[in-house]
């Protein structure tokens, strides 16, 4: 008797220890728990049905014998009783079937919500020339890495923050892994001006008690999971405000709905839940969508989740029902594929603030854009501009092909297109294609491709790109105009151009001929000689 009591006591204590450990490390399981218990109610529904069936089987078997228990099925694990095989099959069917059907119901329900909320417009908002996005993220990250002066820290994340009215690429200064993630704190952030093609980097230091790249309990994800468990947290970005900095973390929540036909099942529908602000001292403040829009800390910032905006537009493929999406494809759209590492939506700044722009093509082989969607980067309010089949516009992939075939660009080696951003000038849509050396050491060209005519305008600096967006005429040597990716172009015969930027802010352009060489003479050092032929990019230096 004593032995049994002692055994029960030990078992109870071990159970309490295990439960305590699981409770402590619950933030590690937060994404899985959210996906299972909130985002996929259909899975829970069918698992409950399976549990009831198994309970009925156990109750019946206890009274009348276990039907099927004598039949065994050959498996990789050996011969297994039939009831166990059936139970395993039902559990797998509940998980797979519940998630697949729930996903289809969710997409159709989201499409209905977006269709009821969208406003059809006749024109697109003009892109702000002063806050133009002329520096691609790959180049910005290279500039930011060049600013690092400590081997103990690395860049984390990569998002857009508005600093004193200027949009910038922002990267957290996170501890560089290993033991540093335990002993060091996030030091602050690096901000790279995206409105200029030259390297304009600001490092703002400040220690975060809870931040990015920090281990276990100091990690922002751990603290957010403890703060509010059942939320779908999205990528953070650093926001400076006065003398402080904050981690802004948007999050998504899911509403449950029930659909009776053709298969009765619960499903969820995502919506923007709000923003959690993590202060440098580790305190967390939750803001509803309305509070986020009126927050002084988030003034001018875009915080509507990118993935949610993309999913909402993509869900319109189900506007005529699931069967139409699978079989007949009437009026079905799909988001246009985009070359490069970034995908839609792209953030552009208009006079009304940050806006996400997404281009949609007809389903299938068609490559012409027939719908353009804009999503307010703060409220998520959608607007849609629809084109007739006769006026379908060039999509980002075709526009990129045109840009890469222009003489200014085609003569370059080891370059790639990046971020074909949709911009609007004088009511006309252009695809702004960045031509970037594969080393990401700078920017070779910016090509504006007229989405209606296919005309291509190439510029070499951020100031020239801003001038183009402002509607100004672009001077020869900085712009080319060619129809459909043809071979003409103003300034296309200028060869390579070196821009010398002096300390007093003045600049001088030097045109290099195809048979010339460039010698960079360092004070007190050796000459560096580069081949300046029009087949390479090494000798081309660009600055605003």
Image (tube, grey):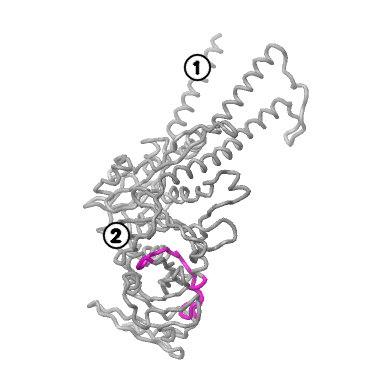
- The numbered disc on residue 384 is none
Q: Is residue 411 magenta?
A: yes
The answer to whether the residue labelled 1 contacts the one labelled 2, judged by CB atoms less than 8 Å apart, is no
Q: Position of residue 258 (x, y in %)?
A: 51, 32
Depth check: give the residue in front, 230 or 268: 268
Residue in the image at 46% along x and 69% along y: 452
Region of the chain picked out in magenta, as a range: 401-427
In the displayed structure, would residue 212 be above or below residue 217?
Answer: below
Image quadrant in which you'd find residue 229: top left
Quarter of the image for the N terminus: give it.
Answer: top right
Residue most extreme to the top: 1
Q: Position of residue 305 (x, y in %)?
A: 40, 48
Q: Position of residue 447 (x, y in %)?
A: 43, 72
Residue most extreme to the bottom: 515
> 10 Å neighbourhood of mark 2: few (<14), some, or many (≥20)?
few
In the image, taking residue 394 as reference, residue 273 lies left or right, namely left
Image quadrant in which you'd find residue 509: bottom left
Q: Position of residue 198 (x, y in %)?
A: 34, 71
Depth check: give the residue in front, 10 or 176: 176
Regarding mark 1 in the picture, which secondary structure is present there?
A: helix
In the image, taking residue 267 as reference, residue 229 lies left or right, namely left
Residue 183 in view (yes/no):
yes
Regarding mark 2 in the picture, which secondary structure is present there?
A: loop
In the displayed structure, would residue 404 be above or below residue 217?
Answer: below
Residue 212 in view (yes/no):
no
Location of mark 1 (residue)? 9
Location of mark 2 (residue)? 351
Quarter of the image for the C terminus: give it.
Answer: bottom left
| Earlier sequence position, callout 1 versus callout 2 | 1
Residue in the image at 30% along x and 56% along y: 352
Image quadrant in which you'd find residue 136: bottom left
Q: Is residue 273 magenta?
A: no
């Amino acid at each position: 008797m004593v032995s049994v009591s002692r055994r029960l006591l030990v078992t109870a204590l071990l159970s309490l220890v295990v439960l305590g450990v699981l409770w402590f490390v619950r933030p590690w399981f937060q994404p899985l728990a959210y996906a299972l218990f909130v985002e996929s109610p259909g899975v829970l529904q069918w698992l409950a049905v399976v549990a009831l069936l198994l309970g009925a089987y156990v109750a019946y078997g206890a009274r009348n014998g276990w039907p099927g228990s004598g039949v065994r099925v050959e498996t990789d694990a050996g011969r297994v009783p039939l009831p166990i095989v059936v139970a395993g099959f039902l559990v797998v069917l509940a998980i797979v079937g519940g998630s697949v059907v729930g996903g289809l119901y969710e997409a159709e329900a989201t499409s209905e919500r977006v269709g009821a909320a969208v406003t059809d417009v006749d024109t697109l908002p003009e892109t702000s020339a002063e806050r133009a996005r002329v520096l691609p993220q790959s180049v910005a990250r290279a500039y930011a890495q060049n600013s690092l002066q400590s081997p103990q820290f690395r860049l984390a994340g990569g998002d857009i923050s508005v600093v004193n009215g200027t949009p910038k690429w922002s990267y957290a200064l996170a501890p560089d892994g290993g033991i540093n993630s335990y002993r060091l704190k996030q030091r602050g952030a690096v901000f790279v001006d995206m409105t200029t093609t030259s390297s304009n980097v600001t490092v703002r230091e400040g220690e975060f008690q809870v931040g990015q790249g920090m281990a276990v309990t100091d990690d922002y994800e751990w603290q957010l999971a403890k703060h509010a468990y059942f939320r779908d947290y999205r990528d953070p970005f650093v926001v400076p405000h006065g003398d402080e900095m904050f981690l802004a973390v948007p999050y998504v929540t899911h509403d449950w709905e029930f659909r009776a036909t053709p298969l009765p099942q619960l499903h969820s529908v995502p919506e923007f839940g709000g923003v959690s602000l993590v202060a440098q001292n580790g305190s967390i403040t939750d803001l509803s969508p309305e509070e986020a829009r009126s927050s002084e800390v988030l003034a001018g910032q875009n915080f509507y989740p990118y993935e949610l905006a993309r999913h909402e537009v993509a869900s319109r493929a189900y506007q005529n029902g699931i069967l139409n999406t699978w079989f007949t494809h009437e009026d079905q759209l799909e988001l246009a594929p985009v070359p490069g590492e970034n995908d839609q939506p792209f953030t552009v700044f208009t006079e009304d603030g940050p806006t996400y722009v997404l281009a949609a093509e007809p389903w299938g082989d068609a490559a012409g854009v027939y719908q353009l969607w804009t999503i307010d980067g703060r409220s998520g309010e959608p607007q849609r501009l629809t084109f007739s089949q006769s006026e379908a516009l060039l999509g980002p992939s075709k526009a990129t092909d045109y840009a890469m075939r222009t003489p200014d660009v085609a003569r370059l080696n080891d370059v790639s297109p990046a971020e074909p951003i949709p911009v609007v000038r004088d009511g006309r849509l252009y695809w702004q294609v960045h031509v970037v050396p594969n080393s990401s050491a700078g920017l070779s060209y910016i090509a504006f491709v007229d989405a209606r005519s296919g005309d291509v305008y190439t510029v070499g600096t951020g100031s020239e790109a801003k001038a183009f967006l402002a509607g100004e005429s672009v001077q020869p040597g900085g712009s080319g105009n060619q129809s459909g990716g043809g071979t003409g172009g103003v300034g296309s015969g200028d060869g390579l151009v070196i821009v010398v930027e002096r300390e007093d802010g003045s600049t001088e352009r030097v045109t290099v001929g195809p048979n010339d060489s460039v010698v960079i003479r360092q004070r007190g050092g050796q000459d560096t000689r580069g081949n300046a032929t029009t087949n390479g990019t090494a000798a081309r230096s660009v600055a605003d």
